[in-house]
Image (tube, rainbow, N blue to C red):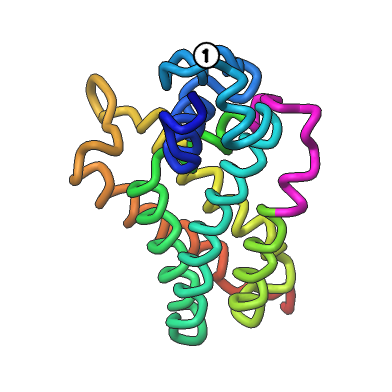
Amino acid sequence: MANAVSRQQVIDVATRLFSELGYDGTSLRLLADAMGVDPGAIIEIAGDKRELYLEVMSRAFESERTMLERAVSQTEPGRTAVHQIVDAYLDFHLAHPHNRSLWAHRWVDDAADISELEDRYARPLLTLAAHKIRDVVPSDVDPYYLLGTMVWCVHGFLGSGVLERTQGMRRADNPEAVASFRHHLHVLMDKLLAPAPSTAR
């Protein structure tokens, strides 16, 4: 039975289910049923549910790390770097909705007993970006909060969209909405990067 599916197939199905239902909402039985095998076969191929989740999150991190390292290495110095990092982050999560969903579940206490992932995965990425932009961030703005603002805005937009001016919602499947949101992010980052007002009289 274990030969009926590959490890990669198990990881792919686990990624989909963890991103759709969360870690707590996904049982090993559900994973096995989705693949048409016994739970024992899943364990033999890829480990138990916790091991699978850690593997899924590790792969999600690696893809995001690759994106951010490329963006940071290719960005121009100064304020332009902030815009380029914003664009790279938004484009990555537009193209990788499972990554966004995996983190969104964690933000509502999914897999609360696995508490080390933010320090292991989120912190290095924020630190990498913060080091790149720290020279253009005013002294009264925390670069981690600035990057957090980008993260919160991107995930909020991709998760729920924004209100239309008159009726309905504008969502991330609408290219015009994405373009408008991208512009808003650039303006927002510029405002955060503006020099602190002088107190001199």
Residue 175, x across and y down, in percent:
19, 45
Q: In terms of depth relative to the viewer, which is nearer, 200 or 84? A: 84
Quarter where residue 159 is shown = top left
Q: In terms of depth relative to the viewer, which is nearer, 7 or 61? A: 7
In the displayed structure, 188 sits above or below 139; it is above
In the displayed structure, 151 sits above or below 134; it is above
- Horizontally, residue 140 falls left or right of residue 133, namely right
Q: In terms of depth relative to the viewer, which is nearer, 168 or 86? A: 86
Residue 118, x across and y down, in percent:
72, 47
Residue 11, x across and y down, in percent:
50, 38
Taking the spot 73% from the left edge, 78% from the top edge, the residue there is 200
Q: Is residue 197 visible?
A: no
Q: Is residue 184 visible?
A: yes
Callout 1: SS: helix
Q: In terms of depth relative to the viewer, which is nearer, 46 or 2? A: 2
Residue 56, x across and y down, in percent:
57, 41
Taking the spot 79% from the left edge, 44% from the top edge, the residue there is 116
The residue labelled by disc 1 is: 30
Quarter where residue 89 is shown = bottom left
Q: Amino acid at mark 1?
A: Leu
The stretch drawn in magenta includes residue 170: no
Label 1: few (<14), some (14–19) or many (≥20) C-alpha neighbours in 10 Å: some
In the displayed structure, 120 sits above or below 161; it is below
Magenta part of the chain: 106-120
Taking the spot 52% from the left edge, 53% from the top edge, the residue there is 150
The stretch drawn in magenta includes residue 118: yes
Taking the spot 49% from the left edge, 44% from the top edge, the residue there is 153
